[in-house]
Image: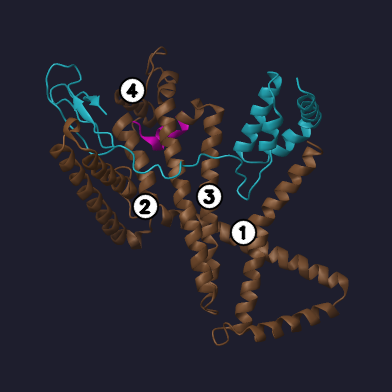
Amino acid sequence: MHDEERAALAKLCDQLPRLRAEIARHPVATQQLLAHIEAQARAGQPVRALLADLLPVDQSGVTRQLETLPSLGPGRPSEERFGCPDGLCDREATTTPAGPLPRCWLTGRFMKLRSG
Amino acid sequence: MSDFFGELAKQLAARWLSLLAIPGVLFFAAGWTGLRLGHAHALDLPRLADATNNVATQVARWPGAAQALALIGVVLASAIVGLAVQALVGPVRAICLGQWPPGFRRLATALAGRRRRRWATLVRQREELQTRHPPHTRTPDQQQRIDRIAGRINEIAMSEPGRPTWMGDRIHALSQVTVNRYGLDLNFCWSRLWLVLPETAHTEINIAQSGFAAALFTATWSIPYLILGTLWWPAVPIGLVIVSVGWSRARVKIGILTDLTEATLDVYGRSLAIALGVADPSATGPLAPEEGQRITDIARKGR
């Protein structure tokens, strides 16, 4: 293991009881992050970068977050068509975007997606 | 990681300052300015400078302990304003998410209906274009028109609208999609799903929720400024700027939160079905609607 990793691990181990007590008063996400760091450390995995994540870097305490990709545009809509769930007939049905799945009137079962 | 613990405490103090104390002190300053100037001399800077000088001169005459106490008093009062604003976040969230009080139900229904009609018109346009131009004969221009209309539909709402606001419809769409496509009643099944989610999913969703809460908190800071505007009109544009910043951030954050939650269901819905014995442990792929309905039955227990 890299020297800096060993040093980080040693300090984590040394301060862990106090750190656990402090983090227990923080949001669940922070507690889970510490639990993850501990699990990584026990498995012999690097933790130095994760420890940096434990420190909140902005006012909301957000350290990393999903962001939408810029300027992707509307994309290509999925043109859903649904068919017989058992493939016994050629009936085809559609629905509104993200709408309820059409059903087979004979069996009451949901129809199967044919193409996206 | 030199004195990691001390660094953590420093960061937390900075967070308290940035969340409560600094906005509170700024409002305190604006409030003092507003009370001194009023509507009649709203932008009279020399008058403000005189008033500030007078106060500074008076404070300078005070003993050191009194000055320190005054400073602590200002910071504490600012933090109290911050806490009061925090208490208003709940009603602001309800307004943003379209859960309006009974007196506004008629307006809410009318606005939701308007959103639904706009959405349905565009859906019809898209269907007509798709029928008129089947995929195998479609030109790139025709495809682009369909793509644009689909984009406009999604800009209004991600499923048939049911609430008077855009943010409300993002949450509404989430509950609709889970019922329509997975047979899951999210109100009752979310806690069950949470128990089978991995740590990374918990973290991501918690972060997205915190981001939305922080954006609402920003928007809520506009309320004291708008109230101050009754005494000092420049507070009104300040309040409007704050509300628009908070509102636009909240729109982005609710989009991320609902997108993540829907993705969680897509990816981990089957884990819940397996945990509840509704699906075979060897089964793969997204949750089937029949399985989702059985999970809903287990969660709702006839309620």
| The N terminus of chain B - image quarter | top right
Cβ–Cβ under 8 Å for marks 3 and 2: no
Whether labels 3 and 2 share one chain: yes
Mark 2 surroundings within 10 Å by alpha-carbon count, few (fewer than 14), some (14 through 19), many (20 or more): many
Q: Which mark is residue B213?
A: 3
Examine the rendered structure and indicate whether residue A93 appears above or below residue B99. Answer: above
Horizontally, residue B203 falls left or right of residue B135, namely right
Residue farthest toward the top in the current orientation of the protein? B282
Give the structural element (helix, strand or loop) at label 4: helix
**Where in the figure is residue B245, as x and y percent of width and height?**
50, 59
Q: What kind of element bears circle 3?
A: helix
Task: Point out the tag, 2 or 1, that comes first from the N-terminus.
Answer: 1
What distance separates the C-alpha of mark 4 from that of mark 3?
33 Å
Query: Residue B61 at x, y = what percent?
Result: 85, 80
Task: Work out whether disc 1 and disc 4 sit on a shared chain.
Answer: yes
Image coords of residue B104 (percent x, y): 34, 62
Amino acid carrying label 2: it is Trp
Is disc 3 surrounded by few (<14), some (14 to 19) or many (20+) residues within 10 Å?
some
Asked if residue B199 lies left or right of residue B179, the reply is right
* Cα distance between the residues tagged 3 and 2: 17 Å
Dominant secondary structure (helix, strand or loop) of the stretch shown in magenta: helix
* Image quadrant where one finds the C terminus of chain B: top left
The magenta segment is: B183-192
